[in-house]
Image (cartoon, rainbow, N blue to C red):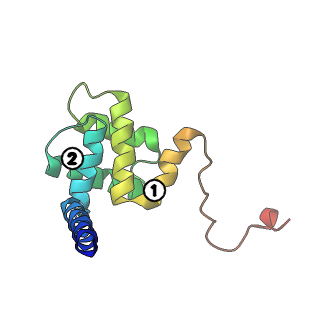
Amino acid sequence: MKTLLRTGLVSAIAACSMALASVAPASADPDTDFGNELHVYGIYGPKDYNAWIGKIECKRLRTGLDANAAESAVFLKTNLPRGTSEQAIYQFMSAGINYYCPDQRPVVDSLAGQPQAANPPVGAPLPAEQG
């Protein structure tokens, strides 16, 4: 009886070990993760190109070249394949922000009607602001 119990226990441990070994490790490459998220949305294309566009999108938002989501969408529409739907453009934008510039999340949140956090003004307050 003890031998049967040990054999069952050893079999259970072996099965758990095999199951854990078969779980794919998380990718350490944000470009791969970005591409995988795009695939969930049905957006396909060269991994390096999509990652490059996502990184440029973030640079344009950070530098103020694109002041809001609408301007960023125009850039993406110009650089994604012809015929890309508006929904796919905004999904691409959101995924790019998720992986390459999470600090720009307010840009996407503004589309949902959530107020963007205002940057505090630089310098001393004006007399009218001193209330």
**Image spot of residue 10 (x, y percent):** 22, 71
Q: CA distance from mark 1 to mark 2?
A: 18 Å
Res. 53 in view: no
**Image spot of residue 66 (x, y percent):** 41, 47
Snapshot quadrant of residue 27: bottom left
Residue at image location 61% in from the left, 45% down from the top: 114
What amino acid type should be assigned to the residue bearing mark 1? Gln
Quadrant of the drawing holding the N terminus: bottom left
Pointer 2 residue? 50
Q: Nearer the viewer, residue 94 or 125?
A: 94
Per the image, label 2 sits on a secondary structure element best described as: helix
For the view shown, which residue lies furthest in the right direction? Answer: 131
**Image spot of residue 49 (x, y percent):** 16, 48
Residue at image location 27% in from the left, 29% down from the top: 84
**Image spot of residue 112 (x, y percent):** 56, 39
Label 2: few (<14), some (14–19) or many (≥20) C-alpha neighbours in 10 Å: many
Per the image, label 1 sits on a secondary structure element best described as: helix
Q: How many marks?
A: 2
Residue at image location 33% in from the left, 59% down from the top: 100
Q: Nearer the viewer, residue 67 or 11?
A: 11
What amino acid type should be assigned to the residue bearing mark 2? Asn
Quadrant of the drawing holding the C terminus: bottom right
Residue 104 is labelled as: 1
Whether label 1 touches label 2, CB < 8 Å? no
Judge from the rendering whether residue 24 lies leftward or rightward of residue 73; answer left or right: left
Which tag, 1 or 2, sits closer to the chain's start?
Answer: 2
Q: Nearer the viewer, residue 44 or 68?
A: 44
Residue at image location 19% in from the left, 60% down from the top: 22
